[in-house]
Structure formats: structure tokens, C-alpha cells
């Protein structure tokens, strides 16, 4: 019995040590710290757009590392509505994602007083399901708009969605909608694509369980002395 307890405690310790992805996040560089080929993000935008990794000055919140995503509109002129995005595509192949899994995209968005969103400009997170060569349905978070609080990161999350049948990939995007020549810059940070179906208990929960098991083991040894 004591050997069994020791083995179980060891397993829990290993989960605590190696469970950094306990929440099921699979995005590469969700904090936008990498550059070049290692960075997981692609950019769907006009050539003159300012999508890039950059420091976000003036936002009253700590960020991880030194960089965050800066995303703006395309400035196509007239009354045209255009979209910019930074995105990653993840295969639904039974490894990280399978049909029927429950997922959501979440993270932080902000705009600054010095470059606040104006007009109908919006920034948001979006999940799109890919069916063969086509996008098949999208799920969006709430929108960062000209009315949103400035100079601080705000948390946004899409509703939890189930991956439908025949979907081959998931497209996770940070998107910027520009209406006409409205101005503004949005910043994104701590972006995660969460698979709730594959998530395991967080390290904090596991640590409480381990402490309880160790206490029980100690109590049992006392009684046998």
C-alpha cells in the first residue's frame, strides 16, 4: 500500500513539473516574442499595414517579455471596410484537436489614448473552421471599439464552440476591422487557443491533491507505528 502511495505521489509531482500546458493552449508564441521562421503567426493584410511585433508604450498593465502585437487598418480609402489579421492554422487531426472538442480563443486587447480606435474600427479574436479549401463558419469575441477603456489591457474571449464534423483545421485570428479611413492602433497580448476537452487539472489544483495525499500517507504511517 505504501509503495502504491509513493508511486501515485511521484506521478502527481511529474504532472506538476511538466503540466505547463495544462489549460490546453497550443498556439505558438501567443505573447508575440518570437521573430522570423520560429514565430507561428501569419499576416493576412495589405502590404502597407503595420502588423508587427513592437513594444506597447503607455498601456497600464504588465506584459510578458518586451513585445506585443501591433495591428492597424489597411487605409484603402473612401468608405471601404477592410480587415487585417494575424493568424495561425492548426490541423484537426486527432493530435491536439479532434472533431467534437470544445474550444475557445482568448487573450488581451488594448488601445491607447494617443492612438485610440475611432469611427467604426474594431479589434477582436476570431475562430474560423476550415472545411477543405473553404472557411466554414466563424466565432468571434466581443469587440474592442472606440468606446472601450483606454491605456489598459482588457480580456476578451470567444464563446466555447464545438469543432463540427469534417473540419480539417482551425484558424485562430487576431483581427482588425477598419471602416473607411478611421484611425487607431490595437495591441494584442497573451493570446491562447484553449482546448477544454484535452485540458488537465491546473498545477494549483494538482498541488492541493498531492498535499492531501501526502497528509493521508503520514497519518497512515502514524497509526501503524
Image (cartoon, rainbow, N blue to C red):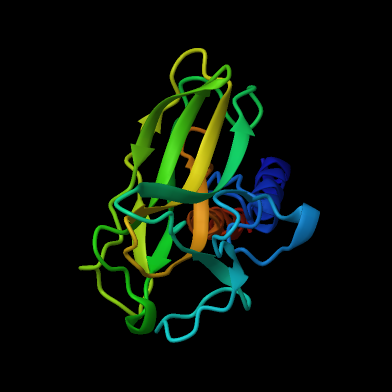
* Spot occupied by residue 41 in the image (x, y as percentages of width and height): 63, 51
Indicate left or right for 18 with 139 as reference. right
Q: Dividing the picture into quarters, in which one does residue 184 lie?
A: bottom left
Q: Is residue 116 visible?
A: yes
* Spot occupied by residue 1 in the image (x, y as percentages of width and height): 66, 40
* Spot occupied by residue 207 in the image (x, y as percentages of width and height): 54, 59
Say which residue appears at 51% left-offset and 62% top-offset: 190
Vertical relation: 33 (above or below) 156: below
Vertical relation: 112 (above or below) 137: below
Say which residue appears at 32% left-offset and 56% top-offset: 180
Extreme-top residue of the structure: 166
Vertical relation: 24 (above or below) 120: above
Q: Quadrant of the C terminus?
A: bottom right
Nearer-the-camera pick, 159 or 171: 171
Vertical relation: 35 (above or below) 103: below
Indicate left or right for 181 with 73 as reference. left
Q: Is residue 201 visible?
A: no
* Spot occupied by residue 50 in the image (x, y as percentages of width and height): 55, 65
Q: Dividing the picture into quarters, in which one does residue 55 lie?
A: bottom right
Amino acid at each position: 500500500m505504501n509503495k502504491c502511495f509513493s508511486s501515485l505521489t511521484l506521478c502527481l509531482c511529474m504532472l506538476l513539473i511538466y503540466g505547463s500546458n495544462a489549460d490546453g493552449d497550443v498556439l505558438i508564441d501567443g505573447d508575440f516574442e518570437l521573430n522570423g521562421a520560429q514565430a507561428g503567426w501569419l499576416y493576412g493584410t495589405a502590404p502597407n499595414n503595420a502588423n508587427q511585433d513592437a513594444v506597447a508604450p503607455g498601456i497600464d498593465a504588465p506584459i510578458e517579455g518586451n513585445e506585443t502585437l501591433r495591428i492597424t487598418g489597411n487605409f484603402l480609402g473612401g468608405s471601404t471596410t477592410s480587415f487585417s489579421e494575424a493568424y495561425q492554422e492548426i490541423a484537426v487531426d486527432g493530435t491536439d484537436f479532434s472533431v467534437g472538442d470544445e474550444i475557445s480563443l482568448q487573450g488581451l486587447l488594448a488601445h491607447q489614448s494617443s492612438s485610440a480606435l475611432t469611427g467604426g474600427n474594431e479589434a477582436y479574436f476570431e475562430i474560423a473552421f476550415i472545411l477543405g479549401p473553404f472557411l466554414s463558419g466563424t466565432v468571434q469575441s466581443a469587440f474592442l471599439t472606440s468606446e472601450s477603456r483606454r491605456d489598459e489591457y482588457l480580456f476578451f474571449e470567444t464563446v466555447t464552440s464545438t469543432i463540427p464534423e469534417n473540419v480539417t483545421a482551425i484558424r485562430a485570428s487576431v483581427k482588425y476591422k477598419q471602416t473607411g479611413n478611421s484611425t487607431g492602433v490595437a495591441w494584442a497580448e497573451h493570446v491562447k487557443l484553449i482546448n477544454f476537452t484535452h485540458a488537465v487539472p491546473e498545477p494549483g489544483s494538482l498541488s492541493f491533491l498531492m498535499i492531501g495525499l501526502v497528509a493521508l500517507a503520514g497519518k497512515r504511517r502514524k497509526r501503524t507505528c
